[in-house]
Amino acid sequence: MKIISNLLETIEGIENWYIAGLLIFFSMFIIFLVRTLMKPRQEMEEIKKSILDDETGEKEKPQNNIKP
């Protein structure tokens, strides 16, 4: 790790990339949080029911048509 840290210290302006990465991460986190909180309650209930619905899972399973 010492080689990598020495290499990164020699690059000028590398700290700008750290700041940009953190800004991108936190902005995406805030966007996802706001979009989730602004979804209508009914839509969230539909999503919850579709995940827990066993019948849907049975229909999506691929059938094995290989004969021995």
Image: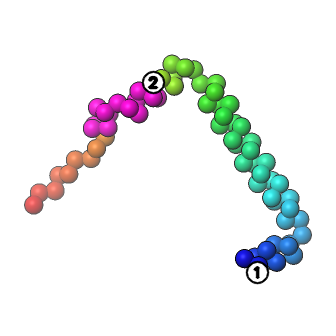
Classify residue 57 as left or right of residue 26.
left
Query: Where on the picture, by quarter, is residue 49?
Result: top left
Can you identify the residue that label 2 sits on? 46
Q: Secondary structure at mark 1?
A: helix
Classify residue 67 as left or right of residue 28.
left
User: What is the total number of numbered labels drawn onto the structure image?
Assistant: 2
Q: Which residues are magenta?
A: 47-59
Determine whether 47 is above or below 17 in the image: above
**Residue 60 magenta-highlighted:** no
What residue do we see at 64% from left, 24% from top? 38
**Residue 57 magenta-highlighted:** yes
For the residues labelled 2 and 1, say whether their Cβ atoms are less than 8 Å apart.
Answer: no
Task: Check disc 1 and give the amino acid type.
Answer: Ile
Can you identify the residue that label 1 sits on? 3
Query: Where on the picture, by quarter, is residue 59?
Result: top left
Q: Residues within 10 Å of mark 2 (few under 14, many from 20)?
A: few
Mark 2 or 1: in front is 1
Q: Position of residue 10 (x, y in %)?
A: 87, 75
Residue in the foreground of this view, choosing between 54 and 56: 54
Q: Residues within 10 Å of mark 1 (few under 14, many from 20)?
A: few
Determine whether 27 is above or below 11 in the image: above
Q: Main secondary structure of the magenta part?
A: helix
| Rendered image coloring scheme | rainbow
Query: Where on the picture, by quarter, is residue 68?
Result: bottom left
Classify residue 45 as left or right of residue 61.
right
What residue do we see at 59% from left, 25% from top? 39
Task: Check disc 2 and give the amino acid type.
Answer: Glu
What residue do we see at 51% from left, 25% from top? 44
